[in-house]
Amino acid sequence: AVVSTQSGHYGRATPSAVGSKGVNAGPLPPRTNIHPNIHPNIHPNIHPNIYPNTPSSGTGAKGRKKNSKGNSKPPLYPRIPITQINLRHKKGAWGTLLSNILIKKHPIILATEPYTETSNLLPKVHKDLVPFYYKKGDHRPRAAILIHKSLADKSWELPQFTTIDQIAIHFKHDKEDMILVSSYMDYTSSSCPPTEFIKLVDYAKKQGLPLIVGSDTNSHHTLWGNRCNNKRGEDLLDLMVLKNLKWSNKGSTPTFFNTQGHCSVIDLTICNKAAENLIDGWHVSSQFSNSDHCYIFFDLITKTKITPRQIRNVKSTDWEGFHKSLASDSKLQELNQKELHNKEDLDKAAEDLNCILKEAYEANCPITYISSTIKKPPWLTAEVQTAQRGVRHQLMKARSTKTEPEWESYRKRAREYEKLKKKVKKTGWREFCKSTESMRDYARMNNILKSSSCKKEKLEALYKPSKKKKVPTATLR
């Protein structure tokens, strides 16, 4: 770490000189001798986000306006919840993630090391979430961003910065543009951060766009809460100082735990100067993640409220009412009896027919709104939720005691939780197949079977024993 001395010079800090929370063990140097980008945690007045109760000019209690009761109250702005997590390539971690973000409106997920199928593609996580990741299929992607479908039309990928370890999207909300990034910094790589990350930082600076990066850096430094430094951490800090980047992490709560009792802070939320005021409520969650990494939750502050999208679902159209509306429409009857003499009459008749069909369709297909939350998965029953809470309770107990019997009890509960989820999913699927009666349900079943991209699950046709002709029924082996 680069720290200031009383004489105003900068030098390297050793692990013995810097505590586990990144605070110098000796007396604090004067504020005038410290550069905020070099050592933002060493003095409360330099980084007010780390010490939220410390008053400072414009951001503390003195800088806030008081309400009618005389209490200081920060202004409320619309917020978009963002979840940052390393899933460790675990299939069950996707389902646990969904169960923990059900109540969030317009959620965004910055994921690293997501579970992928044998085709190196992500499974269909949820119909309400739109994924962005490296989709060429020749390598397993280690970074992904999932956007709620209500925000999908405001987001597009930046392919020039897409690699197996990085995905960047341009997110536009009203008149606000920004770049959201999920980045995995490989611990076996000699360069930290990677070259693609540096190019992306330069691009955001050139375009004048806010940049928010959720990254598993695999780097240690005392400034973001580790007990010691490594070369990767020092290189990453040097680049952040050079490019005027900051990290939004608060405190020294570990973001990574393993069953051997090791913990560290390797997951960082990095932003540039234009985005530092857009992040609020950053914290490490204690919820069970089904991974050895913890959830990181924070809010993206926006100046305008997200208006719900209006759509007309064609599948919900009353086609019988549509035909009745056309049959009783006097305009359509007049149009059928009208004589067409030239091109202008033909164009006018086509326009009138368009309007008649549109009015009949809108009368029989009502407007619906896209929900701002994700739909609850059918397998998330009360029994599964109870088991999930039990696993979380045992996990917190194992982390506090750090004894092998408690960790073994946690692993046992986690295995039982995964078995219960599989059992509930299998039972639900069988009940759905048994209760299928209408053609719409059969079509839905067919789409579910065909949507599987896993090579182990093959879609095949059934044959009648007496005939060689195929029966229009499909199943999974």
Image (tube, grey):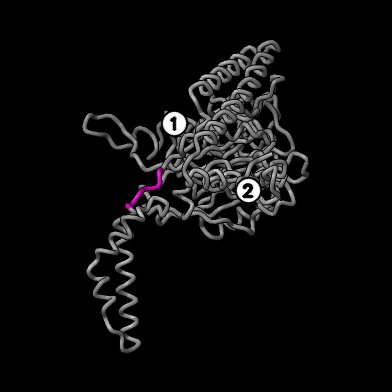
Please name the predominant secondary structure of the magenta segment in the image: loop
Point out the tag, 1 or 2, that comes first from the N-terminus.
1
| Within-10-Å neighbours for mark 2: few <14, some 14–19, many 20+ | few
Q: Is residue 369 magenta?
A: yes
Start and end of the magenta stretch? 366-371
**Residue at disc 2, secondary structure:** strand
* Residue carrying label 2: 471
Provide residue 1's location: percent of width, then percent of height.
67, 36
Quadrant for the C terminus in the image: top right
Type of the residue with mark 2: Val
Q: Residue furthest bottom?
A: 342
* Residue carrying label 1: 52
User: Viewed as shown, does residue 300 lie left or right of 122?
Assistant: left
Type of the residue with mark 1: Pro
Residue at 26% of width from left, 78% of height from top?
337
Q: Is residue 343 above or below residue 61?
A: below
